[in-house]
Image (cartoon, helix red, strand yellow):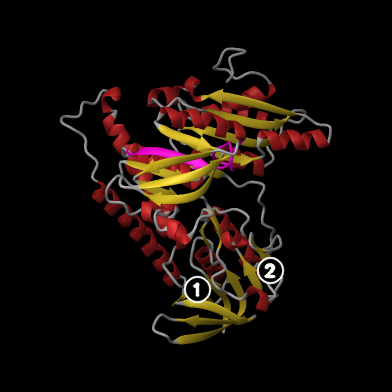
Amino acid sequence: MYDLVVIGAGPGGYVAALRAAQLGAKVAVVERDKLGGCCLNRGCIPTKALVRSAEVYTTVREAETYGTRVQGSVALDMRAVMARKRDVVAQLVGGVERLLAAADVDVYRGTASVPAPGRVTVARQDGSSEQLETRHIILATGSKPKLPPVPEDHLRLTISSDDALELEEVPASMLIIGGGVLGVEFACIYRAFGAEIRMIKRSPLLLPPVDEEISRRIMPVLKKRGIKVNTGVFIKAIEETSAGRRVICDTKDGGEVSFEAEKVLVAMGREPDFGDIDLDALGVEHDRKGIKVDARMRTTCAGVYAIGDVVGRTYLASVASHEGMVAVEDMFGEGRDMDYRVVPEVVFSSPECASVGLREKEAAERAAETGREVAVSKFPFSANGKAVAMGETTGLVKIIADKATGEVLGMHILGPHASDLIHEGAVALKARMKAEDLARIVFAHPTLSEAVMEAAHGVGGEPLHIAAGRRP
């Protein structure tokens, strides 16, 4: 008899299992594929390994800019790039295996079904099965890729993000369907590797999770790097050509346009994967957007919780892990609600984008409802000493605050190490700090973090290191 059985060992499931074990529970995890889920095996980690290879390759090609002369030609070895990526994944997946073993969490390999609350059946590949009894169940079955509305035989002419993580030759050209986080990251990676890149999408802006201004600003940056972007197109067919593939689209004005490339990558985001579990029979309320849960990740079936992508609220590994801890602490510890107010969204583009809290439009709309106003302050990396020394001056830090109180409502960053800097905004939001509080902290010099301090100064007055009236 287990206290908890977790179905799915991604960043939500395995973290939930570890936290439950810390709280003294007897725990089992059921996984039908690989420990670590999509994040470690096919998502966050392998893409960041490729991002790093792209950064190094770009830096070496531009080495003379920094006073370093490279003798001879610089060549990219994609087989070595992919081998390193696999080594990184193997190291981290092995780490998850060791953590679960050290916590005495039992791992069952197979496909789980839930015939009734408190019972989990594990079907193994050899045809055998096993019944597990448990007080609680967590559904952490993850997500699957969204697909364009074309016939299945057309989709066979495309590659998935999984395939893009295994290419051992850089294609001459790649057409990317989708302009969200995944699409932009792959665009930047393969453009750095030398492929001609074009992105196509329906909506007019890239990267819907980030502030609209950041989205607008990154489009010309990508264009400068040679990435072409077409918006307002609707895919209706994919054809094979002698040179590769052709994607035929309708346009928003009723016309037709087509694009050709050697490879067509589908990167339209993800949608919940219920793992073939009969949720209706369990009485677990759900729709195509995900499983319905309350603030402590409880479903409508007593004793059954759901976390991560299968909930469909936000497709972030960090959120899945946190939801897992919230669910487990509700079961075995001091319960707390899941707080989505302070969730950083990060895009590992070139340069990086990151957002936390309210976007400018959201903040203004909410303020207008209560008769309040917002203050917006921006500071460019072109005026930051460390960024200038690094040669990475594209972008800015943007802080949104309540005009009357100065409380920080949101922070948005385009620029170097945005993925690291955004957590200063997350801490400020969590602590309900005022911009003045940030401005009065002594920041080390020279650091990129000083751009945050300068933007904070600008909420109530003017940044120090930019002339009055010259803000971006």
Q: CA distance from mark 1 to mark 2?
A: 19 Å
Q: Nearer the viewer, mark 1 or mark 2?
A: 2
Q: Position of residue 105 (x, y in %)?
A: 48, 74
Quadrant assignment for the C terminus: top right
Q: Nearer the viewer, residue 192 or 257?
A: 257
Q: Quadrant of the N terminus?
A: bottom right
Question: In the image, what residue occupies the spot 36% across and 57% down?
Answer: 89
Disc 2 target residue: 299
- In the rendered structure, which segment of residues is drawn in magenta? 195-211
On the image, the x and y values in percent for residue 358 come to 67, 39
Tell me residue 305's x, y (percent). Answer: 64, 69
Category of crowding for the residue at label 2, using alpha-carbon neighbours closer than 10 angstroms: few (below 14), some (14–19), many (at least 20): many
Relative depth, front residue between 76 and 60: 76
* Direction right: furthest residue: 371
Q: Is residue 401 left or right of residue 271?
A: right
Left or right: residue 292 versus residue 94 is right
Q: Is residue 178 above or below residue 286?
A: above
Q: Residue 104, relative to residue 338: is it above or below?
A: below
48, above or below 97, in the image: above
Check disc 1 and report the residue beneath it. 29
Q: Amino acid at mark 1?
A: Val
Residue depicted at x 63% and y 31%: 399
Q: Residue at x 43, y 87 (%)?
A: 128
Is disc 1 placed on a helix, strand or loop? strand
Q: Secondary structure at mark 2?
A: loop
Please tell me which residue lies in front, 380 or 183.
183
Q: Amino acid at mark 2?
A: Thr
